[in-house]
Amino acid sequence: MSNPWFTSKQQVYNYDKKPLEIYMFIDPLCPECWALEPILKKLHIEYGRYFSIKHVLSGRIANLNVSKKKNYEVIAELWEKTASRSGMSCDGSLWLENPVASPYIASVAIKAAELQGRRAGIRFLRKVQEKLFIDKQNISHFDVLKTCAKSAGLDVEEFISDFHSESSAKAFQCDLKITTEMEVQEIPTLVFFNENVEDEGIKITGSYPYEVYVQILEEMLSEQPVKNPPPPLETFLKYFKLVASKEIAVVYNMSISQVEREMKKLLLLQKVEQLPAKYGTFWRYVEE
């Protein structure tokens, strides 16, 4: 059974008015935010009709004094631990070989991408994360960000213009202000809001089992949410283009070994390419 969120007009990230909005406080350099991707994909596929997500860039990593070698070593170790625990690969050696000296640049670039629409911003953020965590590219280099813009399907000239405009910098400053006002101290943090502006949101910091996020949705909705089944695996791959074995495992309730078996069938059919990573495996859908 195909998933209604994978039709041509209404994709997974469907932004008609939803009963809930989730503010997701992140930083593009944060490995814990990257580690949350499998759960977010599953939540979008199963319950995406009930909520939209607004990414708020917290600037938490940008505030670090990343000019000190000792801090690079601490960040590298954090990346390795997070990847090993979560199954979402990120290679800490980047910080020892080619450290990101200007972390805020990527945040401003994400705001520039969002000026082309919320979907564009989400696609661009994912490309930035892939470049950083999988390809070990330095996302404080503007050429890398331009490549991300192109692969995310953005108007690259418009992106360059917006990046250098006041609008993107102001949007980033606005995110920093929201982070302070909502007293967000750690990332990732998700804050769930319903349609009643007088109701306080529910704030959840860090990573939790999938069921916790579903429980919050159920509490905040005035109805029992109906769960969508996931789409056929090939449809999922075609939509997302590049996914981790861990993401497939979470979305389809499979073990990693089951995922590897299924993906090897698609590999033999030349439907996907296998991209081994330091921790786990990624799969790229081969466009016909």
Image (cartoon, rainbow, N blue to C red):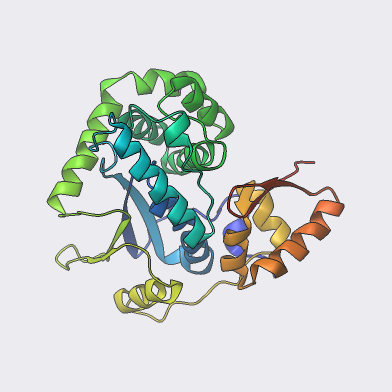
- The outermost residue toward the bottom is 224
Query: In the picture provided, is 198 more to the left or to the right than 277?
Result: left
Quick check: 81 above or below 224? above
Residue at 48%, 41% (x, y): give it.
Answer: 129
Query: In the picture provided, is 30 more to the left or to the right than 138?
Result: left
Residue 97 on image: x %, y %: 47, 30
In which quadrant is the C terminus drawn?
A: top right
In which quadrant is the N terminus drawn?
A: bottom right
36 or 158: which is nearer to us? Answer: 36
Quick check: 144 above or below 201? above
Residue 185 on image: x %, y %: 20, 54
Res 265 → quadrant:
bottom right
281 or 178: which is nearer to us? Answer: 281
212 or 86: which is nearer to us? Answer: 86
Residue at 57%, 60% (x, y): give it.
Answer: 5
Query: In the picture provided, is 4 more to the left or to the right than 49?
Result: right
81 or 14: which is nearer to us? Answer: 81
Residue at 39%, 36% (x, y): give it.
Answer: 114
Residue 193 on image: x %, y %: 26, 63
Residue at 57%, 36% (x, y): give it.
Answer: 135
Quick check: 89 above or below 233? above
The reply to whether residue 8 is visible in this rendering is no
- The outermost residue toward the right is 269
Count every numbered label the image shows and give the total. Answer: 0
Res 218 → quadrant:
bottom left
The reply to whether residue 174 is visible in this rendering is yes
Query: In the picture provided, is 199 more to the left or to the right than 224?
Result: left
Residue 26 on image: x %, y %: 33, 48
Res 220 → quadrant:
bottom left
